[in-house]
Amino acid sequence: MKTIKLRLGPRSYDILVGRRIISSLGIYLKRLNLGQDALIISNSTIFKLYGNLLSRVLKKEGFTLKFALVPDTEKSKSLKTAYSVIKKISLFDRKKRVFVIAFGGGVIGDLSGFVASVYKRGVPYIQIPTTLLAQVDSSIGGKTGVDLDQGKNLLGAFYQPRLVLSDVDLIRSLKMRQMRSALAEIIKYSLIKDARLFGYLENNYRNLIRCDRRALELVIARCSQIKAKVVGEDEREKKGIRTILNFGHTLGHAIETAGGYHLYNHGEGVSLGMLLACDISLRLKLIRDDKVRRIEKLIRQTGLPTKIRKVSVERIIKSHYRDKKFIGARNRFVLIRDIGKVTIRENIPLKVIKDALNGRLSG
Amino acid sequence: MKTIKLRLGPRSYDILVGRRIISSLGIYLKRLNLGQDALIISNSTIFKLYGNLLSRVLKKEGFTLKFALVPDTEKSKSLKTAYSVIKKISLFDRKKRVFVIAFGGGVIGDLSGFVASVYKRGVPYIQIPTTLLAQVDSSIGGKTGVDLDQGKNLLGAFYQPRLVLSDVDLIRSLKMRQMRSALAEIIKYSLIKDARLFGYLENNYRNLIRCDRRALELVIARCSQIKAKVVGEDEREKKGIRTILNFGHTLGHAIETAGGYHLYNHGEGVSLGMLLACDISLRLKLIRDDKVRRIEKLIRQTGLPTKIRKVSVERIIKSHYRDKKFIGARNRFVLIRDIGKVTIRENIPLKVIKDALNGRLSG
């Protein structure tokens, strides 16, 4: 097992990455002294697979627990679901010292963090992510949120968990498309911070896709380290450091949105977004052509898209200008200088963005 | 004008107390650099009285603004109202740099702080309290919240404003009962921290009740200083320092609840709660009898209740044990040693509490 520290003064916490480590959860929790009453937020899919295991592990150490199950869909990231979960907590919360366990993927994690942040001005919570994407990304860093009709993550808080426990053995053989989506984020970490990880991915992407546990453990630990360091330096995205985690996300989100969230999932949007950031960087002479081709090759090999289909440049641009990352009238991009090295630029001319998009259109 | 600093490192802010200082609001806001777009949360009563004034003051300095008016009732402290306000913000929030102004009493302040804390993981907000109670208490310290059916303030956050502007001239001749309710909190500040203020109140309570502006300004500034110091030392009520602000509130809340929130308002509950804390302290030989009689005299003179009517001891005890301030099975009280000096005690025997309650029953 690897222990990674996310350093944020009194709000520091550990990220544990390993195999079958969930069996020791009770012991870790006791050390943290969060109370005896755990409200576990999860969905029925995860509950069927691991509900008994988690109950056993916690009861063994004397915890009382209650499950709050929400539907296994993106729509659970809503104020309505949050409210229903909060009602459950308030009924369970008899001895006045409850804590929350997020047990599931990114939707569960974001929802649980939000609920924990607002209930009684904040109760502790821990993250037990059960998908590769949540383990490398959303479970770490304290960004919580629910969606409104008016936009994604419009409600939320920066609210750090007290522990992240990433048990590699909880990752089920995902659908191939989800696995690839997580790979896009992993490639992102290598591109922003770690050329060695990029080399490892070039040699091992096949092992990751077929869920090789050793390869997964190594990659999850490394990505967690990178994210922990970045968040530790710029928790609230105020210093332009955490911003680099958005590499590929600016136009990636716009493509996801323009495709109505079904043509492209998050990882597919991000892989196209990363390539577009490469293209823009190339046009601005920030990066060498052969580097971009190497990046494109890895993305293609993993089965992630490298060309935009079925969405027009106009729609992407329109979604892009609605993005909440816009500050005032300026745009802002994370661009790339080399594998493992990114840079933030503002006021990229619209023509350069459009040219990049047109260059990525299929056919 | 008096400027009081609430020191919380990067989250420090000023509390301005004075007369007609709202006319300079635009200038203070410009210095804070919170953006150009102000969403003002208020109610129609306040809007009719001061809406034009506030608009003029802000527009003069180039701010754009939008009012979100909520009903002038306790019920506006709800998730439903919060959601309706958030929708308004998301529609107004075009240039992506909106901030919130809470313009009203305690309900407006708590609701606005909550909304600002959750919208897009937190936007800045400022407090312009328009009641005496909000000026001396709820506008300061960052406790935000909305009520659920399951309990008061069950949802909320610790989220500090960027400025508190207490303009004494915004306080309208309140109904006498509300004025007295605020006086109970003011007496509380003197009892926990400031024997000199207590002496001032003994000599000047009549001036305060008839809304003498000079007396009000002095008292608001002093209470703000006390609260700012306490919150600066223990923002999240973790060190047993902020706890002293709950003097009189433990049994006070229980009496309010037991009376169904109409027999006793907040200040009336608190005045009875303070007297009960005095009685318990007396029974535990913490304070001298003549001090308690002096406290009781001031409370009686201001017209606040000193006897419990129409609520049974059993109901008060029952509400008390449901209070969220309970930690585990222990009770916890702020007791008093002298005027200006309090102490925190746990595990007060139920018999002592009951005896104190019985001693305060009317007739």
Image (cartoon, coloured by chain):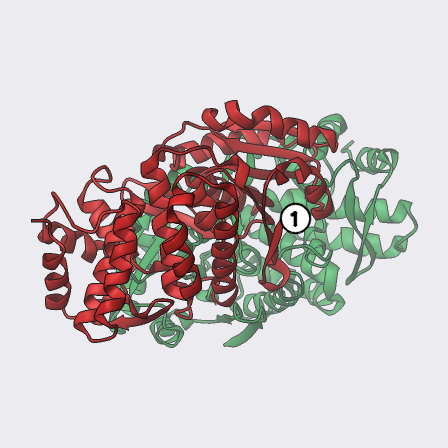
Chain colours: A red, B green
In the picture, measured across the screen, residue B60 lies left or right of residue A23, that is left
In the picture, measured across the screen, residue A221 lies left or right of residue A305, that is right
Q: Position of residue A11 (x, y in %)?
A: 60, 58
Q: Which residue is label 1 attached to? A: B303
Q: Residues within 10 Å of mark 1 (few under 14, many from 20)?
A: some
Q: Nearer the viewer, residue A127 or B59?
A: A127
Q: Nearer the viewer, residue A58 or A143?
A: A58
Which residue, as the protein is rendered here, is positioned at the far left? A363
Which residue, as the protein is rendered here, is positioned at the far right? B285
Q: Position of residue B197 (x, y in %)?
A: 70, 67
In the picture, measured across the screen, residue B290 lies left or right of residue A70, that is right
Which residue, as the protein is rendered here, is positioned at the far front? A203
Host chain of mark 1: B
Image quadrant in which you'd find residue A59: top right
Which residue is rendered at x = 58% and y = 62% of the image? A8
Q: Position of residue A68 (x, y in %)?
A: 52, 28
Image quadrant in which you'd find residue B256: top right
Q: Does residue A345 sit above or below A319 in this rendering? A: below
Q: Does residue B156 sit above or below A51 in this rendering? A: below
The residue type indicated by label 1 comes to: Gly
Q: Nearer the viewer, residue B67 or B302?
A: B67
In the picture, measured across the screen, residue A64 lies left or right of residue A339, that is right
Q: Does residue B219 sit above or below B346 in this rendering? A: below
Q: Nearer the viewer, residue A83 or B20?
A: A83
- Is residue A132 among the parts visible in the rendering? yes
